[in-house]
Amino acid sequence: MDTPEVETAVPSCEPMTKEQEAHLARVIAVFAAACDIKYRRGQREHGGNLFDCSALELAEEAIREAVDQIVYLVTLRDKLAHGAVHRAPVLPMPTSIP
């Protein structure tokens, strides 16, 4: 499977601060860990190769995932609007598949 080239720099961007670089590194690390776990769980649950799915199958699954995301976001917004969010420590990302 060919991997498309990804642009790695934004030419018009101003240099970032150390804090911005650290934040970006954290976002990338959290995403990479979460993506790895999610992909492996999906493989375990569904088997086969995701990249062998038809375009229509991928579109249908993406729509289902988008609907899930909206449900979570609306629920989060409602909790924030009603002050129902309590402070809790940030939990580290899991490093293995349970």
Image: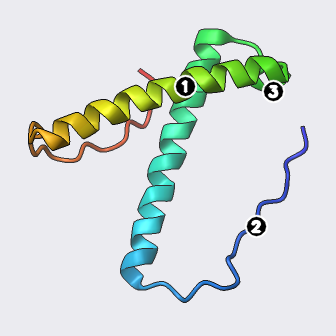
Which is more foreground, mark 1 or mark 3?
1
How many residues crowd around disc 2 within 10 Å: few (fewer than 14), some, or many (20 or more)? few
Q: Amino acid at mark 3?
A: Phe
Q: CA distance from mark 2 to mark 3?
A: 22 Å
- Mark carried by residue 51: 3
Please provide percent x and percent y for residue 8.
71, 69
Q: CA distance from mark 2 to mark 1?
A: 26 Å
Q: Nearer the viewer, residue 10 or 37?
A: 10
Q: Pick whichever of labels 2 and 3 is earlier in the sequence.
A: 2
How many residues crowd around disc 3 within 10 Å: few (fewer than 14), some, or many (20 or more)? few
> Seen in the image, is 65 located left or right of residue 53?
left
Quadrant of residue 17 in the image? bottom left
Q: Quadrant of the C terminus?
A: top left
Q: Pick whichever of labels 1 and 3 is earlier in the sequence.
A: 3
Q: Amino acid at mark 1?
A: Glu
Please provide percent x and percent y for residue 82.
11, 38
Please provide percent x and percent y for residue 52.
84, 21
Q: Nearer the viewer, residue 26 or 97?
A: 26
Q: Quadrant of the N terminus?
A: top right
Q: Pick whichever of labels 2 and 1 is earlier in the sequence.
A: 2
Q: Which residue is mark 2?
A: 7
Quadrant of residue 62 in the image? top right
Q: Secondary structure at mark 1?
A: helix
Q: Amino acid at mark 2?
A: Glu
> Seen in the image, is 7 located left or right of residue 54?
left
Q: Which residue is mark 1?
A: 65
> Seen in the image, is 2 located left or right of residue 92?
right
Give the residue displayed 81% in from the left and 27% down from the top.
51
